[in-house]
Amino acid sequence: MPKFDFSVTTRDGQKVESIQIYGKDLPDAERKLRQMYYNCQVTQIRTINPEKEFSQSADIEDVLSLIVRQS
C-alpha cells in the first residue's frame, strides 16, 4: 500500500508539514487526511515509494523461521 506525504494549511491558518498517510490510492489517502484536518488546504503532495524505504518490521514467517532455528 503506498504512502503519501502531505503538507497542509489548516482552517485556522497553521502550516503542518509531513503528514504521512497510507492509502490504496491518492483519493483514499486524501479522504483520510480530510477526516483529520477538516477544511484544510493541501499545499503539497508527495508519494513515498515503500520499496525504497528500509523496513525494520518482521513478518510472521520471519519470526517462525527464527523460532524453528532456535529449537
Image (cartoon, rainbow, N blue to C red):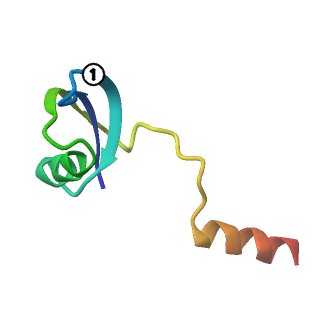
Identity of the residue drawn at 40% across and 37% down: 52
Q: Is residue 42 above or below residue 31?
A: above
Q: Amino acid at mark 1?
A: Gln
Residue 14 left/right relative to 67 = left
Q: Whole-percent x and y of residue 4?
A: 27, 40
Taking depth in this image into account, of 35 and 17 the one nearest to the observer is 35
Q: Whole-percent x and y of residue 9?
A: 20, 25
Q: Residues within 10 Å of mark 1 (few under 14, many from 20)?
A: few
Taking depth in this image into account, of 10 and 46 the one nearest to the observer is 10
Q: Whole-percent x and y of residue 43?
A: 15, 23
Residue 4 left/right relative to 53 = left
Identity of the residue drawn at 17% across and 55% down: 28
Query: Which quarter of the figure has residue 46?
Result: top left
Query: Which quarter of the figure has residue 13?
Result: top left
The quadrant the N terminus occupies is bottom left
- In this figure, what is the number of numbered marks? 1
Q: Is residue 59 above or below residue 47?
A: below
Taking depth in this image into account, of 18 and 54 the one nearest to the observer is 18
Furthest residue toward right: 71
Q: Whole-percent x and y of residue 23?
A: 25, 54
Residue 15 left/right relative to 69 = left
Q: What residue did someone put label 1 on?
A: 14
User: Quick one: SS at disc 1?
Assistant: loop
Query: Which quarter of the figure has residue 14?
Result: top left
Furthest residue toward front: 12
Identity of the residue drawn at 69% across and 75% down: 64
The quadrant the C terminus occupies is bottom right
